Amino acid sequence: MNYPALWSNDVERRIRKKASNLDEQVSPKDVRFCRVCIISNQRPRIVFDADGVCSACRYAERKRSGIDWNKRENELRRVLDGVRDDGPYNVVVPCSGGKDSAFVAHTLKHKYGMRPLCATWAPLIYTDIGRRNFDSFVHSGFDVVTATPNGLMNRKMARLALEFYGDPFLPFIYGQLAWPMHVALRFGIRLIFAGENGEATYGGDTSANDLPSWDAAEWERIYMKGAGVRKLLGISVASEACSKEEGASQTSFHSLPSFDARQQAGLQFHWLGYYLPWHPQANFYHAAEHTGFEPNEARSEGTYSRYASLDDKLDGLHYWFGYLKFGLGRCTSDAAHEIRDGELTREEAAALVKRYDGERPTRHLAECLDYLGIDDAHLQMIENRFRASHLWNGQTLKHAVYDQVPSDRAA
């Protein structure tokens, strides 16, 4: 597809100049790897204990032996019973048709007798497999309200997010969180159920590890990545890429509904993974059997897996920039949680990371560059901007888990 120009040449020059003056991001300079999995202390908000074990691994231990899951499921039934008699729909499920969200929707509907209305925030650039899985999910018996935001504004924000935060995926992340809340308020639904608490499961802020959800006031702090759509719009307005009024009117669903509106409606947002044991591979088998979910024919670039984060052609760049900024690629993320789930040993995971983590995504690169309004030479300039000096020696990663595992095993 040939996308139209994002903005004038003058705006392009201003954006490039502003972005080129960015300071290097702040992260721990002493790189350490978890003694149980393969994640490092470069992951934002992760916590390591005195034994060198990350918070995600400690949470996984608690899931295996420290949680009364029967008690948690009884809590779930009480929460669901509290809204069971509400309207034609009594729960909103954020759902792309992927394995995890399909598992949540199907389980709530068919195991617990709920009436879900699913809320989908469209990907920036749909993949063929993502679109097929979404259609299969709908045809398996679910009502879905889909938001497809203003394409030009979405592209502008993706480009600005890439230049200033090293992640073109941010506008999708904003909308994916905010849209289900808007849907719930507009349909008078008091309950939203998502999948797992990613901060607890993958390593991050631990303050909600024993809670069914974040407190309402915490959403922007945790999930807006320290950026938020308002900051991106501020950059856009300062560069004259759009007016303040234009930006506000075209991004209203990228932002969370007001705290007061959520409080007044009694809106509750819960994670199903708090109440039921959460296992991504089991979710895959469940979704494949019940909602027609299909994995990719080939593995995803940068990893060995075929069934996660399949919807968007920009997924590859999202994970690639995580590798550049933190030394942690897509394979590290996949393999770390599979160690915690008992699917891989640490040695097997480190070998996979050595093979796949540094793979630059090229499968959809031409279309992504066209979408973002840049060429590959400029993308490489941005890549180098986000390579932290304490992690990289030119194109070479200074600290890699596969160089650490043999000494750990010998110890």
Image: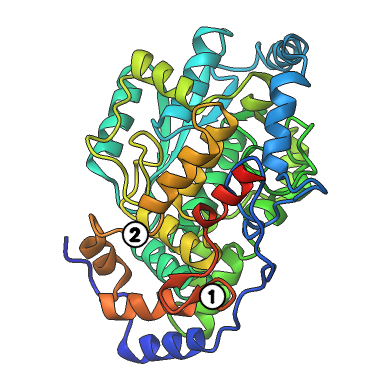
Give me the residue at 53% from left, 67% from top.
325
Q: Is residue 212 above or below residue 401?
A: above
Residue closest to the eye, 408 or 48: 408
Q: Quadrant of the C terminus?
A: top right
The N terminus: image quadrant: bottom left
Q: Position of residue 287 (x, y in %)?
A: 40, 20
Left or right, 354 with reference to 306: right
Q: Position of residue 19 (x, y in %)?
A: 49, 83
The alpha-carbon separation of the residues under discs 2 and 1 comes to: 18 Å
Horizontally, is 70 left or right of 337 in the view? right
| 379 w.r.t. 107: above or below | below
Q: Are marks 2 and 1 in contact (CB under 8 Å)?
A: no
| Residue, far front | 410
Q: Residue at x 39, y 87 (%)?
A: 11
Where disc 2 sits, the SS reads helix
Residue 159: which disc? Answer: none
Q: What colour scheme does the image use?
A: rainbow
Residue that badge 2 annotates = 151
Residue 92: where, in percent of width, then height?
56, 28
The residue lying toward the viewer, choosing from 34 and 248, is 34
Pointer 1 residue: 244
Q: Amino acid at mark 2?
A: Gly
As drawn, is 54 to the left or to the right of 173?
right
Q: Nearer the viewer, residue 241 or 261?
A: 241
Crowd band around label 2 with a 10 angstrom C-alpha radius: few (<14), some (14–19), many (20+): few
For residue 188, say whether it is visible. no
**Residue 341 against residue 51 in the figure, above or below:** above
* Residue 318 seen by the camera: yes
The kind of residue tagged 1 is: Lys
Task: Tell me the SS state at disc 1.
Answer: helix
Q: Position of residue 263 (x, y in %)?
A: 77, 40
